[in-house]
Amino acid sequence: MLLPHGAFVAVVDGQKLELYRNSGSESAPELAPMTAPKLDEHNKESGSRHFSSAANPSRRQLDEDSHAAAVAVWLNEQVLGQKIERLVVVAAPRALGELRRRYSKQLDAALIGELDKELIGRSAEEVLAALQGK
C-alpha cells in the first residue's frame, strides 16, 4: 500500500488507539508516532444492543464497541475539520467492523486503505511492514 507524505495511520483495537503520521515520502515512508487523543467512550449504544440477556454481548464487548465508536467519532471530526486529509485504518477485525459502520462520507473519501489486523503495541516499523505487505 502506498502511503503519501502526511497520511495518518490509526491503529485500533477494542481498548486502544495509536496514531502515526507518514513523515517520510511515498517512496520511503516513515511512521512518526503521535499522541492519541482522550476519547469520550460513554457511547454504550453499540448498534442499539442491550445488556439484558445471555444472547447479547458481554459488558467487555460493549466497552470495546464503545471504544471503536469513540474512535470513529474522533476520526470523523478530524476529517471534517480538515486536520486529516488521508487516512489508513488498521484494526482488529471486530473493531474495524464497528468503525466502518460509523464512517462519515467525508471520512470514507479520505480513507486510502484499511487493514484488518491486530497491531496495537507493535513498533512503527512493524505497522509499516504490515501495510506494505511484508
Image: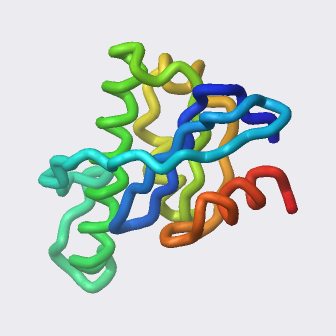
| Residue 55 position in % (x across, y down) | 33, 80
Q: Quadrant of the N terminus?
A: top right
Position of residue 113 in the picture relative to residue 64 (left or right): right
Relative to 119, residue 88 above or below: above
Position of residue 3 in the picture relative to residue 38 (left or right): right
Q: Quadrant of the C terminus?
A: bottom right
Quarter holding residue 60:
bottom left
Tell me the residue at 67%/44% (across/down). 30
Relative to 69, residue 59 above or below: below
Residue nearest the viewer, comparing 127 with 50: 127
| Residue 58 position in % (x across, y down) | 27, 80
Position of residue 2 in the picture relative to residue 96 (left or right): right
Count numbered badges in the picture.
0
Tell me the residue at 50%/68% (across/down). 120
Relative to 133, residue 27 above or below: above
Way the structure is coloured = rainbow
Quarter holding residue 49:
bottom left
Residue nearest the viewer, comparing 78 with 23: 23
| Residue 62 position in % (x across, y down) | 26, 67
| Residue 106 position in % (x across, y down) | 48, 17
Tell me the residue at 80%/38% (across/down). 28
Q: Residue furthest bottom?
A: 54
Relative to 87, residue 17 above or below: below
